[in-house]
Structures are given as C-alpha cells and as structure tokens.
Image (cartoon, grey):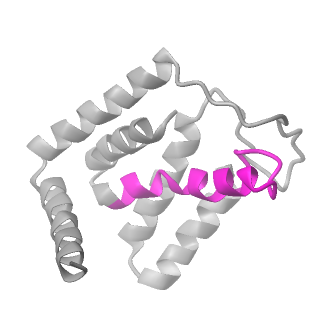
Amino acid sequence: MFILGHIGITAFLASILGLPILIAAISSQIPDLIDKPLFLLGIFPSGRYIGHTLLFVILFGFMTYIITKRKVISIAVSFGMLMHLFEDLPYFIPWFYPFINYIFPTGPFEFQYTLKLFLLDLTGIVLLVALYLKNNGFKKEINDVRRVFVKIIKSNS
C-alpha cells in the first residue's frame, strides 16, 4: 500500500476504536520511515526489515509509553504501526524477525504505481476527507497542526 492509503485507512479504523486519529495515522508511516531509507542506503537487505516486525511495533509502543506516560498515545502509535503491517499484505512482511530467519527479497529497488495502489490511495483520501467533515475531534487536531505550521512559517519570514 502507499502513503495515503496507509494514512486514510488507519485514521478511519482509529476513529472507530476511539483512538487519537492523527497519532495513529502518522504512526502508520513509521515502518517505512525506518526501513525504506536504510534499504536505499544499502544498510538493510530489504525495504521491509526491522520496522516491519511485531517486535519493533511492541518496542516502539513501549518507548512511546515511557516517554509520554500516556497509555492511549502508546496504543495509538502501536495501532498505527500494526495497521501498516496488515495493510502491506499480501506482500512479504517479516512478522517475527529476528526470532525467525527470513529470506529477504533482494534486487534493485523497483516501484510501480499500479491501479490497485491508486485505488487504495483514493480510498485513503476519501476516508480522510469524510473524517475531517464528520469528526469534530479530527477536524480540531488537523486545524491545530495547521495553526502550528502557519505560526512557524510566519516566524521564519
């Protein structure tokens, strides 16, 4: 799945579960933010490596709790990351690495934006727009973030 699909589907499901939507949605990007750059730099053998494991989801969620002392935040982070793994199916996911050895796919980085990926991204966008229009809590979160960015931009001008 691609970025907007991950974000939109995760945000929608987080809203159903009553989790902080924006935190879960942003956290859905963590596995790729860890694995993809390190793969492109030649450090990891695959674009789905340690960030795409259950161990990493658990450890990152635990670290979030240690830092924030807020269970709901750490659950939202773990949920977002876990949703990323499920949304990447049916492709290769090393769920139980390093406890189980996997043969990681090798080869040059290739990416094709297929009709399936486009439709998943479109679904993500539709879900995000629907959440923004129907969920006042999510609308407030987005507007708060927007205000912070506007303030930063104005202070740097």
- Where, quadrant-wise, is the C terminus in this rendering? bottom left
The segment highlighted magenta reads: 23-50
- Camera-side residue of 22 and 75: 22
Q: Residue at x 52, y 44 (%)?
A: 84
Residue in the picture at 38% in, 69% down: 73
Percent position of residue 140, x then y: 13, 61
Q: How far across and how far down the image is residue 132, in percent?
A: 15, 46
Instruction: Give the side of residue 153 with respect to residue 75, left or right.
Output: left
Q: Nearer the viewer, residue 84 or 106?
A: 106
Whether the magenta-drawn stretch holds residue 156 is answered as no
Please tell me whether residue 37 belongs to the stretch shown in magenta.
yes
Q: Is residue 62 left or right of residue 28?
A: right
Would residue 27 be visible to someone looking at this image? yes
Q: Residue at x 72, y 34 (%)?
A: 92
Which residue is rendered at x = 41% and y = 35% of the image? 5
Name the quadrant containing residue 144.
bottom left
